[in-house]
């Protein structure tokens, strides 16, 4: 674990990000990254920081902690509320098993069942949507989230942020737009996406502070 991460928290809970400090063959573009098998929640409650005053909310999913760390940086800059997406059956700590499950889900369009409630979004103008890239597209829990709650996102500014294994954002933003359209969301505006390599999120502070100005 990278020493710089040891005190990183989100809503007072410790973040475990398994790719940090890894480079080259060791990082392998994120392939092989383990997790605690509870989508970063083994010792934590799912993150849910809701206030009466915030005008923006960060809604994210993270399996192995990098997207959660990026979410925490956005939270520190914006003081946004935070809601973690959780699924009924967490992804395995074992990377090959997670990959096999993700491949099956994608081939069968069988996206995971959520284990969360969405609060009213009335007070928010901006929704920061955080996910990771799987097979060059949106990760499946975010796909499920948008397919379940997309119609609640009308009139919001959507600010997508993601971590990936070095191959970029793929078609993920396009897929977000398509699902929102299918779900009947209207009047959305979009900020440019924030894209960070999963092993470099600890060095992304300037990128984050530049991005939140959009
Ligand atoms: C099932 C699976 C598929 C992945 N596919 C890609 C991919 O197509 N392109 C890419 O750049 N990274 C890919 N990755 C790497 C992740 O996007 C990267 O490790 C990310 O930072 C993980 O975020 P997290 O720690 O928040 O879960 C994949 C990871 C997994 C688990």
Image: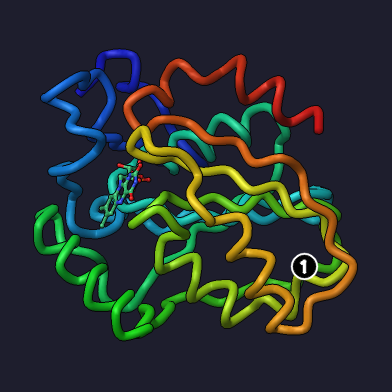
Q: Considering the numbered disc 1 on the image, is that residue within a helix, a strand or a loop?
A: loop
Query: Could you tell me which residue is drawn at 85 percent across and 68 percent down?
Result: 122
Query: Could you tell me which residue is drawn at 44 percent across and 35 percent down?
Result: 69
Viewer-closest of 165 and 214 = 165
Q: What number of labels is visible?
A: 1
Q: Is 12 left or right of 147, judged from the image as shown?
A: left
Q: Is residue 50 above or below residue 26?
A: below
Q: Quadrant of the C terminus?
A: top right
Q: Is 200 left or right of 124, judged from the image as shown?
A: left
Horizontal and vertical percent position of residue 171: 53, 55
Horizontal and vertical percent position of residue 38: 24, 59
**Mark 1 within 8 Å of ligand 1, using the beta carbon:** no
Q: Is residue 30 above or below residue 59?
A: above
Horizontal and vertical percent position of residue 117: 56, 77
For disc 1, the marked residue is: 121
Q: Is residue 77 above or below residue 31?
A: above
């Amino acid at each position: 674990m990278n020493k710089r991460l040891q005190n990183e928290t989100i809503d007072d809970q410790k973040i475990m990000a398994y790719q940090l400090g890894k480079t080259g063959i060791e990082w392998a573009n994120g392939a092989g990254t383990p997790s605690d098998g509870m989508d970063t929640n083994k010792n934590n409650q799912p993150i849910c920081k809701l206030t009466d005053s915030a005008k923006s909310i960060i809604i994210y999913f993270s399996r192995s902690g990098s997207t959660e760390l990026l979410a925490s940086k956005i939270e520190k800059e914006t003081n946004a509320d935070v809601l973690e997406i959780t699924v009924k059956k967490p992804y395995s700590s074992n990377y090959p098993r997670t990959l096999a499950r993700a491949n099956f889900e994608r081939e069968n369009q069988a996206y995971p069942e959520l284990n969360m409630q969405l609060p009213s979004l009335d007070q928010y103008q901006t929704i920061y949507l955080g996910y990771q890239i799987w097979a060059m597209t949106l990760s499946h829990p975010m796909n499920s989230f948008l397919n379940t709650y997309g119609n609640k996102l009308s009139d919001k500014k959507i600010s997508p942020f993601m971590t990936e294994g070095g191959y970029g954002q793929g078609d993920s933003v396009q897929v977000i737009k398509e699902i929102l359209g299918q779900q009947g969301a209207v009047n959305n505006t979009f900020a440019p996406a924030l894209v960070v390599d999963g092993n470099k999120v600890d060095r992304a502070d300037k990128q984050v502070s530049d991005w939140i100005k959009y």
